[in-house]
Amino acid sequence: MDIIVVGGGGREHAIIKKLRENSEIDKIYALPGNGGIAQEAQCVDISATDIDGIVDFAIAHNIGFAVVAPDDPLVMGAVDRLHGAGIPCFGPSANAAIIEGSKAFAKELMKENNIPTAAYDVFDSFEAAVEYVRSGKFPIVIKADGLALGKGVVIANTFTEAEEAIRSAMVDGKFGKSGSRIVIEEFLTGNEVSVLAFTDGKSIIPLVPSMDHKRALDGDKGLNTGGMGAIAPNPYYTEEIAEECMNRIFMPTVKAMNALGREFKGCLYFGLMITSDGPKVIEYNCRFGDPETQAVLPLLKTDLFTIMRAVEDERLEEVKVELSDRSSCCLVLASDGYPLAYEKGNEITIGDISQKDVYVFHAGTKQKDGRIVTSGGRVIGVTAIRDTLAEAITAAYDAAEHICFENKYSRRDIGESALSAIKNRGAL
């Protein structure tokens, strides 16, 4: 069977590498792919948001299955269009992908179904939003309603910062139409957890919980990014919390979407905060997280393609999903200046990375004149799998030393807070 994977980042590279383990798959086409993916799949110069181009290609090449990975094409209805052409898919329809496409929709869903989340208000007016924060409690969280490449969230510590964030989104159009409506919500404190879960709209199977590192700088300082690294498992996600999340968040979300006629099939991402009052939802994503996927998928022992087809066929409960009990660390190597301005076109050299269970996932790379060069802010993710988290972190940083490009930047503290948590409970 020939398949397509829509997307061209580190997440898609991790998915393709995992799909390669299935012998039933003959050829994988990546639309558009990247410089590293080209070593494992045939890259096709079709944008992930060119829905017409994706469908035409799938029909012309007799594609047997499609994996739509990024948020934009999912929200735009890529799965609906592919289904309309008779092509089985992994990923939610547009009316289910709205759970990420509109933060206002997601917050209302949680409110109506008693799913724990932060208190919030939604605003379509700049003046009303500013007036609201003028008498608000700080810090406060300001979110663009629509998709914003993971950068549409601002934690404002003062009124001045809040007003600037609101103006940037609603008046200056920093996020385009995505910022014409905003959600302003209570700032939650606690420990963050990311949980990726397979669901076919009936049952739900969470993967190994992870910890993302969103801020650009060490010590969780600097601007929000798409993610500078991730570790798994997350030590703050205990068995008791997992059970509470299943009963109060995961299944209620699936059932609430079904009740609205928005059955969700695919990977549902839960961004959680473990507060003193228990776990609460920070955000939903309608797809695999990035870079969490690079940390979590290597810990999946069950064949990924088997799971994806079971999700499409609504028989996920028939699949025994097995997860490794080892630990992983994904370190993102970025171009200095990300998430603002950064250089592109710098040649990348990758030395001898021969350690077992170390993976190099390309994100912002492309092939040019026989070389691989940088083409994005997040360039490469290096993931190491080891028996303990401390060993995984060391192995990831060691492997990263063999990858060179001008203006390479990475955080130096990925996983440190998780190690501290493990030490504090005497498990290290």
Image (spheres, rainbow, N blue to C red):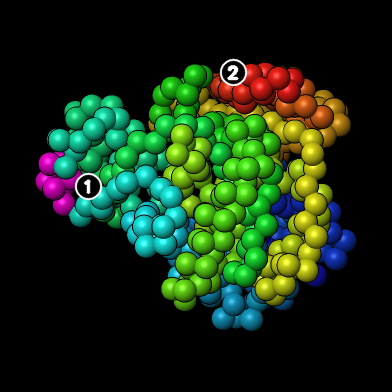
Q: Is residue 209 left or right of residue 269?
A: right
Mark 1 element type: helix
Residue for point 76% across, 43% down: 299
Residue 255, given in percent of the width and then of the height, sits at 52, 68
The amino acid marked with disc number 2 is Arg
Location of residue 48 by image quarter: bottom right
The amino acid marked with disc number 1 is Met
Q: Please tell me whether the stretch drawn in magenta is mainly helix, strand or loop.
A: helix
Mark 2 element type: loop
Segment tinted magenta in the rendering = 125-131
Q: Is residue 322 above or below residue 211?
A: below
Q: Is residue 113 left or right of residue 204?
A: left
- Callout 1: few (<14), some (14-19), or many (20+) C-alpha neighbours within 10 Å? many
Residue 264, given in percent of the width and then of the height, sits at 55, 67
Name which of mark 2 and mark 1 comes first in the sequence.
1
Location of residue 92 by image quarter: bottom right
Residue 262, given in percent of the width and then of the height, sits at 48, 72
* Residue 27 drawn in magenta: no
Q: Name the residue nearer the viewer: 24 or 407.
A: 24
Residue for point 53% across, 49% down: 270
Q: Is residue 93 above or below residue 176?
A: below
- According to the image, label 1 marks what residue? 170
Examine the rendering and report whether any part of residue 253 can be seen: yes
Examine the rendering and report whether any part of residue 351 can be seen: no
* Residue 126 drawn in magenta: yes
- The circle on residue 300 is none
- According to the image, label 2 marks what residue? 412
Q: Name the residue nearer the viewer: 126 or 140.
A: 140
Quarter of the figure that contains the N terminus: bottom right
Asked if marks 2 and 1 touch (Cβ < 8 Å), the reply is no
Q: Is residue 60 left or right of residue 218?
A: right
Residue 106, given in percent of the width and then of the height, sits at 40, 57
